[in-house]
Amino acid sequence: MNWIAYEHYAYAALAVAGTLLAVIGVEVLAHHPRVAPWLKRFEGVVPPFINVNAMLFGLTLAFIANDTWSARDRAMDAVFREADSLRSLLVLSEALPEPLAGALAQEVRGYGQAAAAEFDALRTRDTESETSVAADRLLRLVAAPEAMIGDAVHGQLLSKVMKLRDDRDLRVSLSRTHLNPLKWLGMAALGFLTILSIAAVHLGNFRAGMLAIVLFALAAAPSSAIVLVQGNPFQSPAAISAEPILDAIR
């Protein structure tokens, strides 16, 4: 198994575990007999100070989430465009004489079946060579001299096949997108600074501070994990289905 393909889940677990360790670490240090008296010297930090780091943390998470969900939308659009191209090719094949029409319809359905089967490989950031071979066969058939029965129909056939290949390349590239560790490291640093900011504001009443820290952790950790586990649009829990492609060739 390609474990690197599931790095999103490892980062999600790390985000939750890291947040838990940060909360426990602040709690332990705040009640340490040597640290607690030293922290008293810093009382007086005003509450609005929390908003600075918290806002930066929220914005960073929002930007990363937007990148993640934008990639998923692009992958979904590519699948539907691929399905539309397959359906269009089947319709256009009816304008061709036999046996070319039957051969084209057979190649279109063969490509659709290979493309749908490739979705299992996309979950592990891999591809199936059968899909590339089927795409090449389809292009050769459409580009053959016997398919040139008219400029309009032939132009549409070539256009749909080229779009089909482009959309397949797009979904493959989106399935291989890796996480940017620097983005998540920056967000983790901002989250930790927010926890420290909450603790600094509540140095006079650390019980209330711990409640505020726990509430922030309960909001930040699951939100980060939800974004992380959707790093590959073809993996669970919101995996893109191959049904549109299968529906197009039925």
Image (cartoon, rainbow, N blue to C red):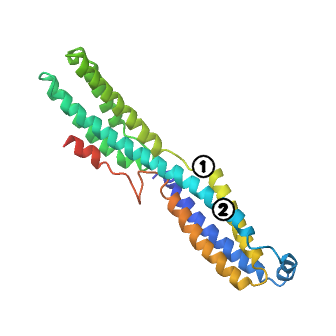
Q: Is residue 196 or residue 139 the one in the foreground? A: 196
Question: Is residue 188 visible in this depiction of the protein?
Answer: no
Q: Is residue 167 above or below residue 117?
A: above
- Kind of residue at disc 2: Met
* Residue 73 in the image, given as x and y percentages of width and height: 43, 48
Picture residue at 54% right of the left edge, 47% below the top: 178
Q: Is residue 115 or residue 48 the one in the foreground? A: 48
Residue that mark 1 sits on? 180
Picture residue at 24% right of the left edge, 14% below the top: 145
Picture residue at 22% right of the left edge, 37% below the top: 109
Task: Judge left or right: residue 222 versus residue 134.
Answer: right
Q: Are marks 2 and 1 in contact (CB under 8 Å)?
A: no
Task: Judge left or right: residue 141 versus residue 206.
Answer: left
- Local SS, label 2: helix
* Residue 16 in the image, given as x and y percentages of width and height: 58, 68
- Residue at the top extreme? 145
- Kind of residue at disc 1: Asn
Residue that mark 2 sits on? 55
Mark 2 or 1 closer to N-term?
2
| Viewer-side label of 2, 1 | 2
* Residue 138 in the image, given as x and y percentages of width and height: 28, 28
